[in-house]
Amino acid sequence: MKKLVKSVLMLSIASLAILSSCKKEDDNATVTDAKVDVTVDPASPLEGGVVTLTITCTGNAENNLKSISVIRTGGSSTTSKTVLSTSLTGTSSSKIVKDTLEMGTYTYTVAVAGEKGSPATKTVTVTTRSLPKQVDVTNATPLFGQSNGAGVNSHFMQLTAPHATFSTSTFAANKSNVDLAFFYGSTNKATLTSPSDATMQGLYSGLSWTGANTTSLYKTTMTSAQFDAVATANSDSTITAMAAGVATWVSTVNLLAQGNVILFKTAGNKVGLIKVDNVTGTSANDAELNIIVISQK
């Protein structure tokens, strides 16, 4: 009898040990975390447009979905905004978030939690594009060499409407509007410069250049026909795309010839194109450069 009791007791202890071991193994079982995937359409929307985030949430048989949140930061706001916060059930779910964006760069942080394990997170960034704007196009406008009719003829120009031109005698009263200057050098023939360019300033002696505007220039490979197409389209989209791709701007472009096209960016961040319509003369005394300007309104 004692042996029977002892056997039953030993079996009981063994059973408890096995159950305890199983429970411990279950407690330490690896939890498969929830997963999240996000697609963005369009990748770069226009300002004022709508971006759509399609969010796919995935749990598993041992870890049902519990909740999702989407937080937006960026743009003109310094505070974050919760654009979605809701509970989830089951092992799979899809959510669509539509958001209207102004100009700027926005970051969306998506977090999906399961009933167990760590939340799944994903961050996507969206940068909006500015709406195309109409452009102003000038007629052919003459600029003259530094010694050609000084005080009377136009040597300087405003690159935005009304695209006024200025002589040395009218420069002082209009310095804040001057975006471009022309000179004809012995080696740097037919040259357009920023008002901040030191070489040009030295050729127009007697003028005060303190506070002169800084205009950025870039000599493009655009053809005359492509320039005309931009004018016909009456849109700045081509110009802004070109400007965004310029790695190095300069303050002067020289040795200009008929058909050359120069991209510019003013001190006020207006961009546009200058086409050389014609060049005549062989010195500072008789040089004349006719240009056509396309500028943002």
Image: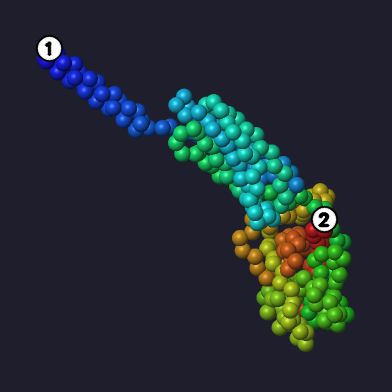
Query: Residue 69, relative to residue 17: is it above or below?
Result: below
Horizontal and vertical percent position of residue 97? 66, 37
Horizontal and vertical percent position of residue 295? 80, 60
- Contact, CB < 8 Å: mark 2 with mark 1? no
Horizontal and vertical percent position of residue 32? 43, 32
- Secondary-structure class at tag 2: strand
Residue type for callout 2: Val
Q: Is residue 144 visible?
A: no
The mark closer to the camera, 2 or 1, is 1
Q: According to the image, label 1 marks what residue?
A: 1
- The one nearer the camera, 131 or 231, is 131
Q: Is residue 188 visible?
A: yes
Residue type for callout 1: Met
Q: Is residue 56 left or right of residue 20?
A: right
Quarter of the C terminus within the rendering = bottom right
Query: Residue 54, relative to residue 238: is it above or below?
Result: above
Query: Residue 258, relative to residue 229: is it above or below?
Result: below
Residue lying at 53% horizontally and 31% vertically, measured from the top left = 65
Residue extending furthest toward the front: 1
- The one nearer the camera, 144 or 73, is 73
Q: Is residue 228 left or right of residue 215?
A: right
How many marks do you count on the picture? 2
Q: Whole-Å distance between the Cαs marked 2 and 1?
A: 108 Å
Q: According to the image, label 2 marks what residue?
A: 135
- Secondary-structure class at tag 1: loop
Residue lying at 19% horizontally and 16% vertically, measured from the top left = 8
- Number of other residues with Cα within 10 Å of mark 1, as a class: few under 14, some 14 to 19, many 20 or more: few
Quarter holding residue 138? bottom right
